[in-house]
Every structure is written in structure tokens, then in C-alpha cells.
Image (cartoon, helix red, strand yellow):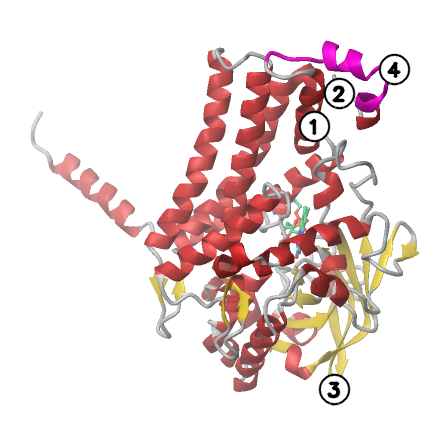
Amino acid sequence: MPARTGSEYLAGLADHREIWFAGERVKSVVEHPILGRAARTLAQLYDMQRQPALQSKLTYPSPTTGDPVSLSFIQPRSIEDLVRRRMMFKDWADFSGGMLGRTPDYLNAILAGCASSLPHFAKNGAEYAERISAYYEFCRERDLCGTHTFVDPQINRARSQSEQADPSVPLHVVGDSAEGLIVSGARMLATLAPYADELYVFPSPSRTQQSDAPRFAFAFTVPVATPGLKFICRDSLDTGGSPADYPLASRYEEMDAVAVFHNVVVPWERVFLKGDIVLCNRLFRDTPAFLHGIHQFTVKNLAKAEFVLGIASLMAEAIGRTELPAYQQMLGEIVDAVETERAYLRAAEADAITDESGFVHPNPNILSTARNYFPKIYPRLIEILQLIGSSGLMATVTKRDLDSPEIGEEINRYYQSATLMGRERVQLFRLAWDLACSGFAGRQVLYERFFAGDPFLLMASRFLSYDRSAAVARVKAMLARSYNDTEK
Ligand SMILES: Cc1cc2nc3c(=O)[nH]c(=O)nc-3n(C[C@H](O)[C@H](O)[C@H](O)COP(=O)(O)OP(=O)(O)OC[C@H]3O[C@@H](n4cnc5c(N)ncnc54)[C@H](O)[C@@H]3O)c2cc1C
């Protein structure tokens, strides 16, 4: 089956999934007055894949059928493949200004990375490698959309799962049967869950003890619409208002949900790691699988930084501040963020590594640094938007005010700026509000801080895993030279 259209994607959501939102079980995600809006946004992305002008950029021929399938599923075998895939990522990221963190290409790329890391799964048993390979092909050929969950509920982070006061809360194995593994408990956060076809349950980063491996060490997937599996959504940041008033929240509210499992049967062909805590812990350390996800979200970060730059530039011009050195410096900071992201991507592709099977992976060192950079810079980019916009972010009204025969003309006049009449200025500043100040904006900052993993641990692991031997040796050599130097 070729890459899906939007309507094919939406039709796939019409199943028996158990999604809870605002105290009610959602009958139909697509027809829901709030949730349905982001579903239709995602459908537009799928439609892009089949547009004649874009199809060759966004797809590649399936290795098994020759049908055009999403390029995000490619297993790169050259730097050109990485570059081609990056351009596909960028087309999708630019569609939302980087506001959709979880476009389906993110997990598609990680899954392709898993399928290029078969020796790791084979260490758990040959059948595990066969299963992940078959599952990758299954998703690629059906163009399925995934969500994933790593993290156990935030009960007591000082304790392992079995040491919790109620150890039945973290997702755990309760038994098995001829059909599969049986699991119960919860996992914290699956972004995009209401809109996904598949849930990827990756190994938890909790401090699982060796003796607990049979209960807590696993990697598997299930369809979102699986009996016994429910998703409980947080409150929506989309108020249901007009896209003219809430240009971002009304379209790109990708939703986060907690996944709760009640004796869910995971078919054996969907169990990819089991009972081996070392293989689970090292899945994304010893294999390049997650690197492909970082490649995707570094492109998203570039799109997002460019989007901020566009809005900040228009705002500064609008209020006649581009001549001020302080504003120029703030805008310069955004330019640096844009170019830093671009440089990470180009460098990671240029210094890509080729593995023994001929698969090509973006450079791990460069992408690890890229992963640590954006959580620090994004809050600053948003601060700059607030500093540039200042009270102008408050001098806004709704579309109804702008269209009002009584006050519309007054607003057009009294809300004008150096470059824009009131109508246009209000639209620009409402967009900036949604990006920098609204509830949607707050979640975006939280997302960038945390979604890619714990920023403290990630930074510490840069030090712990980085090969510093050459740098240390050079310093030691200089110390020795200085000490032995007889010159006074
Ligand atoms: C908007 C959003 C969407 C997300 N979507 C997903 C998703 O789709 N799938 C998924 O699996 N996960 C998702 N996550 C979760 C994300 O993976 C976690 O937030 C991240 O791994 C950190 O874990 P935690 O939030 O449980 O923080 P905790 O582990 O509970 O830590 C709490 C705080 O303590 C800090 N901390 C921890 N150790 C130390 C230390 N030694 N010294 C100092 N500080 C420390 C942490 O950095 C953090 O600030 C999402 C998170 C957010 C905010």
C-alpha cells in the first residue's frame, strides 16, 4: 500500500480505541469538536505525500513492493539518503513552524533505526530480530502513525519500580499465554496518542534491578486500539476558538496522554526485547536507532528556530525597533540558534558513520550535542519574543472585534504600528502570543525541555561517555614540558 492520504489516515482512526478526555470516553477522535482539529491537521501532512509536486520529495519506492512509501522509513545507505530524508523532515516540520513535535516521521525514523540494529535484538534471541524486522516492514507498508512511551509514572524517582509503595502502578508483566505477554500498569506520557495507530512501549529508564528484569524489562508494541489499553488525555490547550485568534493552538495541539494497561495481551510477534535488563538499558545506547529520531527532531528544531526568527523580525519591524542595538542583538541570538541547528545537521550528515551492514547513521557525537542544545536555547528564544513584543502582546483583540462594524475601524486605526495597520498587527501579535505566552506556548517550552529525555542525565552522560583521552593527554604533555623546562 502506498503512503497514505489524509482521508486514509483519518479512516484508520475510526476504531475502538479507548481515549478519555475531560471525563468522558471519546466516541470518535476525528469527529470530536476539540480533538478532531489536530487530527485534520495531521491528515494534511499525509495528503502532502500524494501531491504530485511533493510525492517524489516525500516518498521513496518500497524495497518490497516498489510503491511510494514515506521517506521517513528509509534505512539510509549513503549520505545522500540522509540528506534526502532531512529535506523530507523539513517539508513536514515547516508545515507547522515546528509546532508539531511528533509528526509521524519521528517514530518512523526510529523504527527504521531499530530495523537496522538487528544484532542487538538477536542477542535476546534470533526470533526477536526477526520480529522487529517484520514489524518495521508492517508499519512502513501501511504507513502507520506511532506514539511511544518510555517513562514510568513519577511516583518516587529515588526508588526502582519494585520498591514503590504500590509496585503494581509502573507497567509490568503479569504473565503470559499462548497468544502473548500479559501486561498491566501505567506509563507516563504518550504524546500524539489519540492520533496514533500504534503504541511503541520502549524500555523504561527507571533503575530496574536485575532481579526485577522478568517483570520490568521489555520492549513491545500494540495497536492503540487494543482491548484493556486506555489513554487518559490532559486538558486541551485548544480552547476551540477560531484559528484566526489561536493560530497555533487550534491546529497543532498534539495532546499528551497517560497510558493505562489492564491485562493487555501483547502478541508474541510484537515483543522485541524481554527479560534482559542490559539489552533494554542499552537499546538506544549501543544501537544507532534513536540517532535517527534525533536527526528528525534537529530538523524540527531548525524549522522552529526559523519560525521564531520570522515572527520576531516582523514584530521588531512593526514597532520600529530594528534600529536599536539591543533588539538587533536579540534578533542576532535567534539567527545564531538557526545557524547552529543547520550546522549540527550538516556536520552530522557529513561525518556520518557506516556500519558493518552498510547502513549509514548520522554522527552520534554531533547529534548528542544537538540534542542537548535546544532544551537550553528554546526557552531563551521564547523570552526574546516576550521582550520584543512587551505590551504589544496585550494590545490585541479577537477576530470578532476586528470584524465588528462598531469598533473594527477604530481598532484598525488605534492598534496600528510602524509597518502594519491595526488589523494586521493584531494578527501578528496574536500569533506571537500563541507561540510565547499562551498555555500552548508553555507546553511547547516544557516539551522542548524534556521530551528528548532528562536534560541533567543527558548532559552528564556527555561527560561520562565522551572520549576525552586525547584532550587529557595533550594537557598532561604540556604540564610535563612546562615542569621540565629549564628556561627561567
Ligand atoms: C510535553 C511533554 C511530552 C512528552 N512526551 C513523551 C512521550 O511521548 N513519550 C515518552 O516516553 N515521554 C514523554 N515525555 C516525558 C519525558 O521523556 C520526560 O519528561 C523526561 O524523560 C524526564 O523524565 P521525568 O519528566 O519523569 O522527570 P523526573 O525523572 O521525574 O525528574 C524530575 C526533575 O528532576 C531532574 N533530575 C533528575 N535527576 C537529577 C539529578 N541527578 N540532578 C538534578 N536534577 C535531576 C529532572 O531533569 C527533572 O527536571 C514528555 C514530556 C513532556 C514534558
Residue occupying image coordinates x 77% and y 58%: 194
**Disc on res. 179:** 3
Residue 162: x, y in percent? 73, 66
Disc sitting over residue 406 in the figure? 4
Which-is-in-front pick, marks 1 and 4?
4
Q: Is residue 254 left or right of residue 314?
A: right
Q: CA distance from mark 1 to mark 3?
A: 51 Å
Q: x, y percentage for residue 359?
A: 39, 69
Decide which of 389, 14 is in the foreground and name it: 14
Mark nearer the N terminus (1 vs 3):
3
Give the residue number, with chain letter if any, for mark 2: 396
Name the residue that disc number 1 marks: 433
Crowding near pointer 3: few (<14 within 10 Å), some, many (20+)? few
Compute the Cα span from label 3 to label 2. 58 Å
Amino acid type, label 3: Glu
Dot placed on the residue nearer the N-terminal end, 3 or 2: 3
**Which amino acid lies under the numbered mark 2 shown in the image of this protein?**
Thr
Most extreme residue toward the right is 24
What secondary structure is marked by label 4?
A: loop
Task: Write the start and end of the magenta stretch as one range.
Answer: 401-418
Mark 4: amino acid: Glu
Residue 374 marker: none
Q: What separation in Å lies between label 1 and label 4 (alpha carbons)?
A: 25 Å
